[in-house]
Image: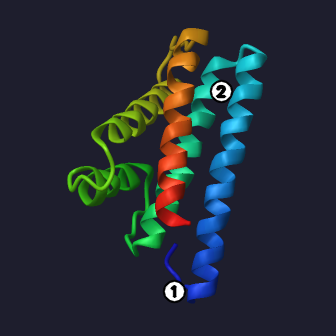
Amino acid sequence: MKEQLDEHSKKELIKYRIERAEQTIEESKLLANSSYYNASINRLYYACYYAASALLLKNNIQANTHAGVKMMLGLHFISKGTLSKELGKTFNTLFEKRHSNDYDDFVYCDQDTFNELFPQAKDFVKALKEKVL
């Protein structure tokens, strides 16, 4: 987002991104319940991405790509201990799985993968929500 936001607009956008993150977590459950595990992992990643982008916006940190969000999250929050290394690992894992699911052939996620990553993604969104709202 390149244009300058006033404080009210910034707060509303942060709130929207957190709401979007929470809704996207719920979407992932619906997809997993229908055995669309690759899509459910994609939604888990995007839930975390929306929360991470809200945190960056709250702190006036710009990132224009998914890799940029990952890098800025690590640089400004994980490496400084503001967010735990476990949360950083969750985001990195979901980033890699989403990328692999989208661009590599013969990549399949299963229910075990979803069951492992779902609570981690929920914890990630919850932790970042507490930091921005």
- Give 54 or 119, whichever is nearer the viewer: 119
Give the image quarter of residue 60: bottom left
Circle 2: residue type: Ala
**Tag 1 residue:** 4
Q: Is residue 53 above or below residue 61?
A: above
**Residue 129, position in %: x, y?**
54, 56
Q: Residue at x 66, y 47 (%)?
A: 22
Label 1 crowding class (10 Å Cα cut-off): few <14, some 14-19, many 20+? few
Task: Let me know if residue 102 appears in the view.
Answer: no
**Residue 122, position in %: x, y?**
56, 37
**Tag 2 residue:** 39
- Which residue is at the far front? 130
Earlier in the chain: of badge 1 and badge 2, it is 1
Q: Residue at x 33, y 50 (%)?
A: 83
Q: How is the image coloured?
A: rainbow
- Give 83 or 45, whichever is nearer the viewer: 83
The label shown at residue 35 is: none
**Residue 25, position in %: x, y?**
66, 38
Task: Let me know if residue 34 appears in the view.
Answer: yes
Element carrying mark 2: helix
**Residue 38, position in %: x, y?**
61, 21
Element carrying mark 1: loop
